[in-house]
Every structure is written in structure tokens, then in C-alpha cells.
Image: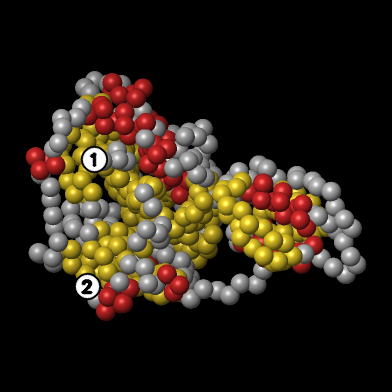
Amino acid sequence: MLAFSTIAQQPNNTVFNIPVTINTSEKNLSEVLNEISNKANVYFSYDATVIVSDRLVSLHVKNEPVIQVLNSLFDTSLISFIEKENQIIISLIESIDKTENILSPIVNAPEYISLSGKLIDEKNGDPLLFASISVFNKPIGTITNSEGEFILKIKKEISEEPIVISCLGYSQKILTVSELIEKETITLHPVSIQIKEVKVNAIDVYEILNNVISKLSENYGDDLLMMKGFYRETLKQDEDYINISEAVIDILKSQYFNTAREDKIRIVKGRKSPDVSPFLWVDFKLMGGPTTMTQLDVLKTMNSFIDPEFRDLYKYNINRVIWFHARPVYVIQFKPVRNVLFPCYEGELYVDRETFAVLHVDFGFSKQGLRIAEQSLIRKKPKSFKVKPESVRYKIDYRYSNEICYLYSAKASIMFKVRNRKENINSQFYSVSELLVTDHKKSQIKRFPRREIFTKSDIFTENINSFDEQFWGNFNIFKPDEELNTAIENLKTNFKSNGNLFLYNKNYLTNSKSKK
């Protein structure tokens, strides 16, 4: 609470309408509120564990009402203001009692432009999968689907900004919005850089890894961030889709230096396909959903192949140097040493040759690691069933925005084999979970209301609603490919469950008996 000397307000007047003049740059929010308090003679009250009071703000206003000043200082989709006599309470909008007198600004909804198209290889015409389409120097973007298609929605007010299109192994292309509207198909030219062309000085792979860690704050910043994301979860049994669920989410991303504080998730808007159970005996559900996906940020969680304490468990080598998003990057291969009794991964790290920022990670359990990890992947299972993980793969992308790197996308692909000789069951379950960060900004809050947080034990499909076609409005999403669109149409509306229920994620597979 910030408390200052006050003067009784005049009858029938409101503290929100008191005019103030403030001219200050790069000061802590708490100091700016202090200055407003002194000039308007009001109290400000807020919970310091919720509001980020040490963030730097600049304010240049002349004789503007207090409410307009507060609206410029805070994100009014998150924060509301309550007047009580000569006191203004600043609070999370979700945590305020609705019976209170909340003053919320009336804001006209911004106009949006929808851009769509298809990316292909200039030489062979093949679609370019998971390519990035984003607004230049702004954290707004999307990626192409498995057919090279995309949809990007941007506010009309930034339609003059160029659109950057980039893909691993291809030259970057920059187009205006008008050029993008005119083009249904965009071609990218394949390029490569041989290691001898960019080699300046010999560098040890461990020196690169040490630089990755030492430059975390420099490359990824020290700010608490609010990210807007899109999450999709699909499940196939053999060749058939049996569930498709997706949501727009908020990610409260903690600082990279604060490894003890986990990122927090809340669902903004979600939908799912009608559930079906073509396989009579088991039903898989993913635990944790988008919460577990944020843990794929290997730089935040200090995964074993990044953490110096586990470095002796791995072999590293610089495989090559390639051109990636208009920057030369080292491609570092890693794999576990022989006979190590630890669930190690194998894969590749893409490290910016100049800044030592990690831009891309592609990894999964090695065969040896998968055997060791099987016990942690499968907590419980029916005695008569054999459940074996066959493949666990992850991909993470980071993107630059104003010289700082941010988490951009993550993908988890998991395959399990389920067998039961007595019932003549032999089936394969394939789950894909995808996360795309479509926008971000410095956070004004430190936590979500507890009841809104999506936890590791929550089941994503049980926390969202049914499908409808015009659901997303102006939110940026992954464009579904043709196979996924067809699957949505074909899914049945009735859900029948019998036998055993399996819950799994990248760490756990559990079982519980159905009521039947």
C-alpha cells in the first residue's frame, strides 16, 4: 500500500476525475504512483505480490484525469480500479468481487486484417512446413502447417509494418502487407553456408555451451513476460484421429535467471472435437497439456544437455554451420555416452554464431534413454496390458525481437504401443502437442488467480468446450491442414468409454478404472 496525506473530496465528485500533470521518464511504477498520489491527494492500494511495481514506465501528461493516466499505465484487460472514498484499489480484474464499483474504460475494438497464403520451395515446389511468418521487429506471428499454409491476423494500425517470412535452410523474404495480400503462393530460395565459409577461429564446443549459459540474461532478457499463445493437442489411434483440442492461452513467463519459478498458464478460450472411442479398451488423455509444453523451454528448465552438471553424460560436436533466419548458426550434435544409467537425450542445438543465443532445439530420448525412462513414462497400467513408449521427440524454436530472443514455438510428438494378447489388441497411439507464441509484452502482474491456473495434473480436454467454426475471431492460431479438417468433420458426437483410462504426458502414463 502506498499511503499519503489526503484532502477530503468534494461531494458528488470522484477521485478518478482529478486532473494531474506528470512528466517523467524511465521511473519505477511505484515512484510514478507516488507522484500521482502527491498531486491528486489520493491513496493507492495494491498487492505487491501481484502487481509488478518495479517495472520502468514513462509518463507525459498534462491536466489529464487520473483514470486516463491509470489506463495508460496498466493493461485494463488484466487490471481494474476500485474507488473507495479517497482511495483507489488496483487489483486483478478476475479477483475483484463483482459487487464492487469497478471503473472500466470503454475501448473500441481494433480492426484486424487477415493474411493467408502458402509457402513453397522455389526449386521443387514442395510445401515448407513450420516456417515463420511474423511482423518485423514485433512479437506477432504464426507458422505454416504441414501443407505450407498459414493465416496471420494483425491489427490494421500496424499494417504498414513489413512481414518477415523465414524457414530453416532458406533465404529470408520480407514483404509488405499489400504484396502478401496479392500473393496466394510465396516461394523461398534454398540456401546453405558451408562451415569453411564462415569459419574465423577454431572454437571449442564447450566454450560455445559456456557462452550460451553466461549470456542468458543478455540474450533472453530479465523481464517477466505475458505471452499470448495457441495450443493444439491431437491424438491418433493407428490411422484415425480420436481427439482434437485447442485453445488460446496466456503464459506468465518468469525470468530465465529465476529457475525456481515455473511459468504459469491459464486458458483464455478453448474448443475440442466431439470425443469418440473407436478403441474399446483404453482411452489416452494428456496430463498437463500446455503447462508441460512450457517446460520444453530447455534454457529455462536447464535440461540435462544444457546443464554443466550433466555435461559428462554427453558427447558433443559441432556438426556444421548453416544459415538460419538470416544468421549463421552452429549446429551442435549431442548424444549420451555409452552405458550411462540416466535417461539422456540425443539431438541438435542451433546456436547463433555471433550472440550464442540458442535459436532451435530438436531432441528426443535415445534408444538407451527411452528404455531407462520407460518406468517414469508409465506410472501404472493394467496387469494384462503391455504399454511401451516407442518414440518421444521434441522441437523448440526461439525468435529475435528487438535484439532479444523469445520462446516462439514448441512441439512434442509421443508414440505408444498398447498390446493385450488375451483380447487380441495391438494398437498404436500417437499424440502431437503444439504451442505457438503469437504475441508477448512485459507483464504487469506477477501471478494469476489461483483458480485460473492450469496445473500439471489437469486434463486439457476436460477444461474446454465443444468445437464451432467461427470460434477464434481475431486470435492467431495454427491453420489446420486438410487431413485435420477432414478428421474434425468425421469425428462422431458420442463418446463411449469402457475398460481402462490412461493418462500420459512426456513424463507420466497413469491408469484408472472406469466406473463401468
Per the rendering, the mark at residue 353 is 1
Looking at the rendering, which quadrant does residue 49 occupy?
top right
462 or 275: nearer the viewer: 462
Q: Where is residue 186 shown, x and y percent of the image?
A: 21, 69
Work out whether residue 299 can be spotted.
yes
Looking at the rendering, which quadrant does residue 338 occupy?
top left
Which residue is identified by label 2?
185
For the point 40% across and 63% down, which residue is it?
A: 477
For the point 26% across and 27% down, which residue is it?
A: 207
In the image: residue 23, left or right of residue 475 = right
Residue type pointed to by label 1: Arg
298 or 495: nearer the viewer: 298
Question: Which quadrant is the N terminus positioned in?
Answer: top right
In the image: residue 134, left or right of residue 187 = right
Number of dots carrying numbers: 2
Q: Where is residue 135 shown, x and y percent of the image?
A: 36, 63
**Position above or below: 76 against 498:** below
**Position above or below: 310 against 156:** above
**Position above or below: 274 against 423:** below
